[in-house]
Image (cartoon, rainbow, N blue to C red):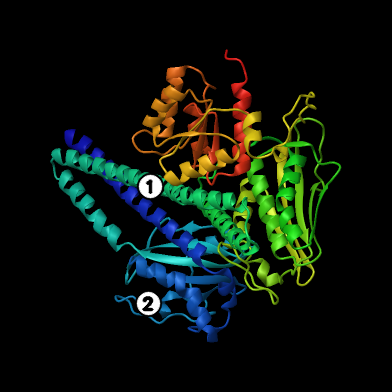
């Protein structure tokens, strides 16, 4: 009876362990074949159609991802591409042409050779057009193998072929051998062997847990690296752009102003590049989070068009906005990401248009109904230009990262080639689809449709006395006289402290400063400032902890008014600052207009009576 119980337990453990190992092999194969399909160039795959192309330069370039994968993963025995034809499956690319298996040298198949006796899994993949992994291995004279198949699609989603990978199970069999030996010895009559097998199983699970922990740690390290990279680049950029802006506000010769304008625009271009790289990395890693909330659509569109108006004016282009009569006033969406999409598309249209116009329009999509109340509708946004246009074969390359198109008249434009790739991903994240129509020499139309919920429009605000617009404020003592404040600047960077002090002195203030959180606590008790401009990342005591201690000591959530001035500007970091007790966040590089708005808000709060 004891032996029977032990035998059942050991049999179950052996079955579970081998099943787990085979499942891991299948999942690894699924990842390999998916990666290979993703790395293939659909245009090259589609172009390999004739036997005489075997081994030519296009064939080599098309085979490169398979050859690279085979060199990285020795367990891959065969890697190839096949297509579906009326006669059956036919090979188009075979990595064996470049890499021979030492244990089974064979001649590579030629382009168009019939795939003789294909497996059920290959036929199933060809029928369904999805990734298919064989459920059972097959065995021939060279060993046991498992196959995986993944579709290769072009940018339009059309199938151009299938990647097939056969992976050797020799390593799996070596891993299964200790399990089999343990199982047989245990069945010989030793109950103790069942304990050893259970321990082995537990160790396997712990190893998997450690592996998952290592993966999670790697993801955290990547996020930390990106955040640190952003901070370390934004911090010196704050000094470069801020000081350049201050000098531009002084009396300069024409040549000096031209040089400084170039320096400032170059710094702003570097900042834009940093933002694009961070956005693209977030999208690729799947960590992009949407903030869906009601927003007023017309002001968002007008602000996006106004932001690009100076670019259009510089090229003497007419930039206009058309809003359909049925478009709702308010919708529920991620306003920041929608604005980012529009700015990318409008900026791209202006970049490739030398004369004529750029028209931004939004309409309720045909067939989409909109009734009063929180109903769903679909909006179609269009950006139409009269620019150089592009050929049909170039449209497929538009949304590939780091790709820049050239035209017969233009060299590649400045930029990373990420704007449209990011826009496509953001549109997809919002549940929409982006399309392009273009005619060389006549212009292009970028169109995307978004399903949205209609939100209740905000009621008309009651008339209130508003402060004069910031643009009407005069610099110098007049601003400080209108908004008197005692200000403390806290930053461990001497450059950033100096920049902040210069900006404030231009407005008529005499700020005090501190180099870290500990000194800020001391200065706050002595000065009792109305406003503290606080860096977040500082030695000895960071800005978040300093804010918590100030709030605990004063027990007042709005006195002093504490504003984070930081190069960490993500939504999560902003939330952390607010939770620590800060009242607002200013992102580096620091802009004069943003600082003025902050000072106005701080003064308004300081004038309110304490509760």
Name the outermost residue toward the right.
325
Q: x and y percent of residue 140 in the render? A: 35, 69
Most foreground residue, 324 or 118: 324
Most foreground residue, 226 or 127: 226
Q: x and y percent of residue 419 in the render? A: 61, 57
> Circle 2 sits in a helix, a strand or a loop, which is it?
loop
Q: Left or right? Give the position of 96 relative to 170.
A: right
Mark 1 or mark 2: which is in front?
Answer: 1
Place residue 276 in its image quadrant: bottom right
Label drawn at residue 122 = none
Most foreground residue, 198 or 298: 298
The residue shown at (74%, 28%) is 466
Most foreground residue, 145 or 547: 547
Lower sequence index among marks 1 and 2:
2
Q: x and y percent of residue 470 in the render? A: 69, 37
Q: Decide: is 162 above or below 458.
A: below
The residue shown at (80%, 43%) is 368
Instruction: Give the alpha-carbon distance from disc 1 to disc 2, as whole Å.
Output: 36 Å
Label drawn at residue 221 = 1
The residue shown at (33%, 35%) is 540
User: Total number of numbered labels?
Assistant: 2
Q: x and y percent of residue 417 in the render? A: 59, 62
Place residue 75 in its image quadrant: bottom left
Label drawn at residue 99 = 2
Q: Left or right? Give the position of 550 relative to 297.
A: left
Q: Decide: is 528 above or below 289.
A: above
Can the viewer see residue 565? Answer: yes
Q: Left or right? Give the position of 513 relative to 425.
A: left
Q: Decide: is 426 above or below 605.
A: below
């Amino acid at each position: 009876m004891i032996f029977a119980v032990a035998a059942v337990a050991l049999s179950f453990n052996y079955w579970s362990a081998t099943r787990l190992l085979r499942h891991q092999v299948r999942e690894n194969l699924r990842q390999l074949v998916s990666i290979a399909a993703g790395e293939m160039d659909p245009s090259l795959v589609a172009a390999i159609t004739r036997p005489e192309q075997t081994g030519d330069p296009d064939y080599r370039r098309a085979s490169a991802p398979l050859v690279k994968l085979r060199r990285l993963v020795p367990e891959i025995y065969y890697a190839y591409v096949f297509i579906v034809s009326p006669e059956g499956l036919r090979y188009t690319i075979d990595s064996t042409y470049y890499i021979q298996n030492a244990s089974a040298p064979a001649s590579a198949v030629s382009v168009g050779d019939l795939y003789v006796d294909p497996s059920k899994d290959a036929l199933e993949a060809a029928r369904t057009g999805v990734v298919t992994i064989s459920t059972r291995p097959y065995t021939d004279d060279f060993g046991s193998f498992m196959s995986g198949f993944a579709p290769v699609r072009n940018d339009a989603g059309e199938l151009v072929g299938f990647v097939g990978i056969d992976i050797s199970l020799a390593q799996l069999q070596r891993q299964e051998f200790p399990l089999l030996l343990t199982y047989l010895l245990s069945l010989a009559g030793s109950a103790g062997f069942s304990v050893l097998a259970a321990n082995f199983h537990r160790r396997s699970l712990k190893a998997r847990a450690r592996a998952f922990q290592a993966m999670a740690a790697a993801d955290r390290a990547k996020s930390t690296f990106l955040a640190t990279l952003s901070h370390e680049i934004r911090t010196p950029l704050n000094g470069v752009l801020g000081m350049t802006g201050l000098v531009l506000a002084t009396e300069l010769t024409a040549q000096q102003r031209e040089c400084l304008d170039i320096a400032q625009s170059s710094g702003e271009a570097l900042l834009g590049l940093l933002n694009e790289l961070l956005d693209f990395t977030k999208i690729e890693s799947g960590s992009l989070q949407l903030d869906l909330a009601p927003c007023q659509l017309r002001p968002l569109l007008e602000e996006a068009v106004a932001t690009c108006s100076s670019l259009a004016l510089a090229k003497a282009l007419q930039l206009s906005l058309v809003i359909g009569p049925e478009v709702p006033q308010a919708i529920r969406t991620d306003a920041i990401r929608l604005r980012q999409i529009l700015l990318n598309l409008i900026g791209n249209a202006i970049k490739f248009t030398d004369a004529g116009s750029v028209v931004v329009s939004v309409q309720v999509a045909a067939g989409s109904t909109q009734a009063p109340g929180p109903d769903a509708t679909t909006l179609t946004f269009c950006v139409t230009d009269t620019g150089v246009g592009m050929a049909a074969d170039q449209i497929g390359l538009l949304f590939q990262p780091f790709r820049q198109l050239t035209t017969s008249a233009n060299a590649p434009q400045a930029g990373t080639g990420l704007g449209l790739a990011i826009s496509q991903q953001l549109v997809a994240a919002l549940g929409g689809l982006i399309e392009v129509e273009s005619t060389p020499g006549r212009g292009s139309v970028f169109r995307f449709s978004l399903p949205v919920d209609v939100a209740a429009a905000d009621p008309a605000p009651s008339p209130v006395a508003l402060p004069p617009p910031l643009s009407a404020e005069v610099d110098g003592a007049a601003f400080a006289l209108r908004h008197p404040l005692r200000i403390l600047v806290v930053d461990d960077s001497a450059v950033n402290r100096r920049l902040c002090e210069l900006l404030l002195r231009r407005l008529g203030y005499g700020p005090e400063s501190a180099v870290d959180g500990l000194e800020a606590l001391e200065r706050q008790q002595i000065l009792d400032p109305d406003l503290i401009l606080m860096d977040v990342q500082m030695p000895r005591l960071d800005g978040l902890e300093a804010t918590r201690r100030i709030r605990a000591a004063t027990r007042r959530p709005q006195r002093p008014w504490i504003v984070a001035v930081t190069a960490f500007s993500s939504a999560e970091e902003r939330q952390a600052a607010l939770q620590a007790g800060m009242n607002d966040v200013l992102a580096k590089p620091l802009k004069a207009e943003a600082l003025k708005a902050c000072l106005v808000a701080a003064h308004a709060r300081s004038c309110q009576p304490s509760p």
